[in-house]
């Protein structure tokens, strides 16, 4: 380490705080002095979102922590319930960027009020108290909106539709559409928006080289649910903007789909 190890601990902490959470954890193995500096609140305060106190104040359940590193690790390994349990918040473990999931209760689901078509139920595998189960319908139309000011700035986000299938029976989910619109309201203009369609993806009907919700279009998550990528967008400053997400199915009879929500996660270089 040479002269670097002779620097005051606060100075070392300030240097480490300009790296990354992964680098800070690696620094702990250098020496006891470096571990003390790397574990300090000076370091982990920089890795937390600037508005973390406001986020914690909106949690349904209180979060108890003794150090900022402990708080960071808690938020990157668990989900904080917000908005009365209709949304959840976490941190991306590698970058510290914000992650949100909008639960089924917060989404606009066409015909959800009809108990013969949709069932509001619970799932032991869900982070939410309520999920939406499709019983029998011809047209699926699910819409969600989210304010970009809540997300990390200067970050490319990917939106994922999170779901599973009923163990009882599944039918009619061979084809679906997903889309994302980034709506940035113009200043001094009422009831109008500048609309930029970032991406639109389609999951075509099964066939040679094609994919469906049952096959290549989905990915199994660590929490047991499945997900498909709806699209991605770049969140610049995040001011006065909104993301609109839509999931829709082709018009023929379908049932057996269980919706947990739509999740926003920062895009990684490997994606």
Image (tube, rainbow, N blue to C red):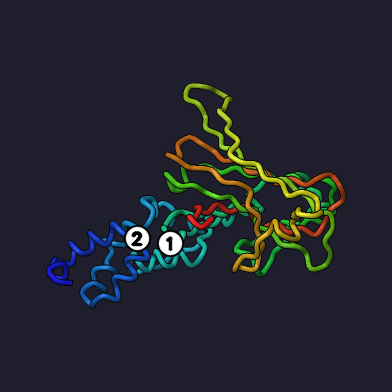
Residue 40 showing in the rendered view: yes
**Is 126 in front, or is 26?**
26
Identify which residue is drawn at 49% across, 59% down. Answer: 90
Secondary structure of residue under mark 1:
loop
Identify which residue is drawn at 58% across, 25% down. Answer: 191
- Which quarter of the picture shows residue 216? bottom right
The x, y position of residue 44, in whole percent, is 32, 62
The x, y position of residue 176, in whole percent, is 75, 48
Residue 131 showing in the rendered view: no
**Farthest-out residue, front:** 208
**Farthest-out residue, right:** 253
Residue indicated by mark 2 = 20
The x, y position of residue 118, in whole percent, is 79, 53
Identify which residue is drawn at 52% across, 48% down. Answer: 157
Q: Using the numbered discs, state the Cα–Cα distance from disc 1 to disc 2 in whole angstroms.
A: 8 Å
**Residue 102, which numbered label?**
none
Decide: marks 1, 2 in contact (CB < 8 A)?
Answer: yes
Above-or-below relation of 34 to 179: below
Q: Left or right of 11: which side holds 92? A: right
The x, y position of residue 219, in whole percent, is 65, 61
Secondary structure of residue under mark 2:
loop
**Is 47 in front, or is 70?**
47
Identify which residue is drawn at 39% across, 54% down. Answer: 52
Q: Left or right of 212: which side holds 41? A: left
Q: Left or right of 57: which side holds 137? A: right
Where's the N terminus, which quadrant? bottom left
Q: Earlier in the sequence, mark 1 or mark 2?
A: 2
Residue indicated by mark 1 = 94
Where's the C terminus, which quadrant? bottom right
Assess disc 2: are there few (<14), some (14-19) or many (≥20) residues with their C-alpha within 10 Å of its C-alpha. Answer: some
Assess disc 1: are there few (<14), some (14-19) or many (≥20) residues with their C-alpha within 10 Å of its C-alpha. Answer: few
- Which quarter of the picture shows residue 201? top right
């Amino acid at each position: 380490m040479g002269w670097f190890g002779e620097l005051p601990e606060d100075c070392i902490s300030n240097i480490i705080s300009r790296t990354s959470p992964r680098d800070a954890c690696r620094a702990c193995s250098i020496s006891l002095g470096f571990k003390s500096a790397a574990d300090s609140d000076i370091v982990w305060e920089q890795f937390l979102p600037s508005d973390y106190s406001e986020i914690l104040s909106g949690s349904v359940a209180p979060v108890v922590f003794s150090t900022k590193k402990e708080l960071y690790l808690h938020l990157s390994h668990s989900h904080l319930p917000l908005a009365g349990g209709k949304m959840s918040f976490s941190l991306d473990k590698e970058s510290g960027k914000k992650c949100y999931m909008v639960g089924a209760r917060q989404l606009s689901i066409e015909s959800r009020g009809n108990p013969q078509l949709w069932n509001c139920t619970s799932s032991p595998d869900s982070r939410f108290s309520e999920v939406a189960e499709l019983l029998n319908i011809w047209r699926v139309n699910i819409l969600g909106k989210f304010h970009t000011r809540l997300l990390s700035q200067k970050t490319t986000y990917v939106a994922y539709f999170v779901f599973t299938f009923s163990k009882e029976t599944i039918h009619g989910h061979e084809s679906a559409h997903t889309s994302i619109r980034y709506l940035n309201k113009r200043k001094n203009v009422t009831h109008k928006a500048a609309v930029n369609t970032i991406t639109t993806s389609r999951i075509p009907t099964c066939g040679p080289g094609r994919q469906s919700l049952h096959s290549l279009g989905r990915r199994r998550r660590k929490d047991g649910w499945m997900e498909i990528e709806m699209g991605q967008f770049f969140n610049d400053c995040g001011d006065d903007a909104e993301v609109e997400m839509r999931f829709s199915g082709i018009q023929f009879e379908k049932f057996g789909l269980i919706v947990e929500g739509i999740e926003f996660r920062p895009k990684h270089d490997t994606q």
